[in-house]
Amino acid sequence: MAHPVARQAKQRTEHIMAAILLENFMHMALNVCALGNPSEPEITHQARIGWRRVQSSLKFFKPLLSDFAPAPMAPLKPLIQATDQLRNLDVAIDITLPSWLAALSAQASKVPAHWTGMTRALQAERNSALHEVNTLAHDPQTTRMLLNMAHWIARLPLQPTPKHLAMDPKHLSAWIFKRLHSWHKRLQVSVDTLDLSHQHRLRILAKQQRYAIENVQAWVPHAWAQRFHSRAQKWQEVLGQQRDQTIALALIAQLGPYSDVAQWLQKQCPSPPGCPAQAIGGAGATDLHTHKAYSSEFAQPKHSHRTHDHLG
């Protein structure tokens, strides 16, 4: 599971980035090495989260890493893409379909006769996806990529400090806040949409925002981090529920003999609101004039007790 990184006194910027990236990497790597366990779908979920947390950190710190390019992560993409299918099947079988079945039973609706056969067919698909993930997780290419990434992170604090990294704690906190704020603005201007492909990209952006906040929470005032995190998490949850239902219907439709069940479910089962801004009560506006207040608040040592807080 993910763990917040604690703030250390007099840490240089490159040491902070290395500590955050190492935690993200270990979260990903330990779960990747355990992939393929049929009784532990949470491992698949955590491996994917770890992958996204590493990507989020690399993207967040990209302006500071211009002189030290990260190890290429492309060799891991086939494995992560394979976990896409496995995770979609896990969620459909273990969460979405049971919730639909409970709703149909509560409404005294007639459950399709093919329901049991459909779930067995999906389970067979899951077994096949699990085998592919297990194979890719143990591929030497995956191991090499993980070792290269670990080596790059270990070398990061040893690099000569470029001018753009030579920031004192106050300036670093201000840089982090401005970076978080710019990501948050992108969410605000994009949230009011009905286009599913755009909503998917928006959900990814919400996840990146959430993981970035969790990674740097020890370096920003708790109230500000909580505010950004809460809204990003709401967007992620609303968009995630809608996407899970859409994917479950698509998986059933691809089963051939059970495609009529997908059409029937689409008519019977309610879906979440189409526009995420409606579902969370509007995007709202972040105060854009608070940077000075933020900086002065962070400069006070009274916030040091927040170091170990975890936003979830």
Image (spheres, helix red, strand yellow):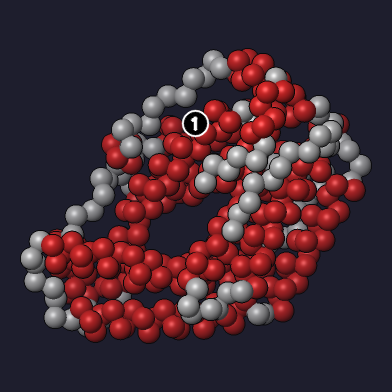
Say if 179 sits above or below 260 in the image: above
Q: Is residue 9 above or below residue 259?
A: above
Q: Quadrant of the N terminus?
A: bottom right
Give the tally of numbered discs.
1
- Coordinates of residue 239 in the picture (x, y in percent): 37, 49
Which corner quadrant of the image does residue 301 belong to?
A: top right
Tell me if I can see residue 202 in this picture: no
Q: Is residue 281 above or below residue 17?
A: above
Which of 270/105 is in front? Answer: 105
Nearer to the camera, 285 or 31: 31
Q: Residues within 10 Å of mark 1 (few under 14, many from 20)?
A: few
Instruction: State the residue at coordinates (58%, 31%).
Output: 222
The residue nearer to you, when weighing 241 against 249, is 241
x and y percentages locating residue 34 in the rendered image: 61, 74
Going by the numbered disc 1, the residue's amino acid type is Arg
Q: From what the image shows, is residue 257 above or below residue 301?
A: below
Residue 105 picture location, percent across and down: 14, 67
Q: Could you tell me which residue is drawn at 30 percent across and 83 percent down? A: 120
Q: Is residue 151 left or right of residue 263?
A: right
Relative side of 37 to 239, left or right: right
SS type, badge 1:
helix
Give left or right: position of 263 versus 220: left
User: On the rendered structure, is 31 left or right of 304?
Assistant: left
Q: Mark 1 = which residue?
A: 227
Query: Residue at image x 60%, y 39%?
Result: 309
Q: Is residue 258 visible?
A: yes
- In percent of width and height, residue 62 lies at 70, 43
